Image (cartoon, helix red, strand yellow):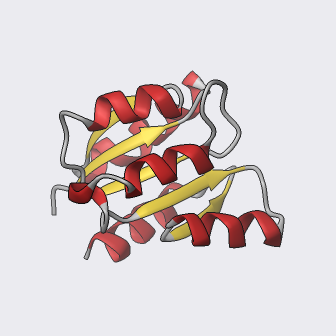
Amino acid sequence: MNLEVLAVDDSRTMRDMIRLALEPAGFTVHTADDGIHGVEVLGGLAPDVIITDINMPRMDGFGFIDAVREQNKHRTTPILVLTTEAAPELKARAREAGATGWIVKPFDPAKLIKALQMVAG
């Protein structure tokens, strides 16, 4: 199953870790370094799943999720939040914005792959 993923995170290390975890499993990984860049990159893509951090400069994950959901073609694209945050109120806010799931960093590559395959299923 070759899934296309857009990973939005301001940490180059985290983007690299996501790429290293997913590419050997057959995923095509596109990256962006914050929410604004994510919206720009998304313009030319039709990813099966989007992964986003919450805490980013210029546009945070909540703003990014809102921007994605405003686009008709991405209204139902699954969005997984990958963040160091674990507060229930933030999870609730992400769900209200349209996030599909929540994974706390540091992530287990096998669990991330499984989660992506599940939501993209």
Q: Position of residue 74 (x, y in %)?
A: 28, 57
Tell me how many marks there are: 0
* Image side of residue 27 versus residue 93, left or right: left
Q: Position of residue 67 (x, y in %)?
A: 44, 46
* x then y, percent, for residue 27: 25, 49
Residue 32 appears in the figure: no
The answer to whether one can see residue 29 in this image is yes
Left or right: where 45 falls relative to 117: left
Identify the residue shown where x is 55% and y is 23%.
Answer: 12
Q: Nearer the viewer, residue 1 or 98?
A: 98
Please give the name of the residue rendered at 79% of the width and 62% of the height, measured from the top-left corner: 86
Q: Is residue 111 above or below residue 109?
A: below
Residue at x 44%, y 60% (from the top left corner): 79
> In front: 66, or 110?
66
Foreground: 55 or 113?
55
Q: On the rendered image, what quadrant is the C terminus found in?
A: bottom left
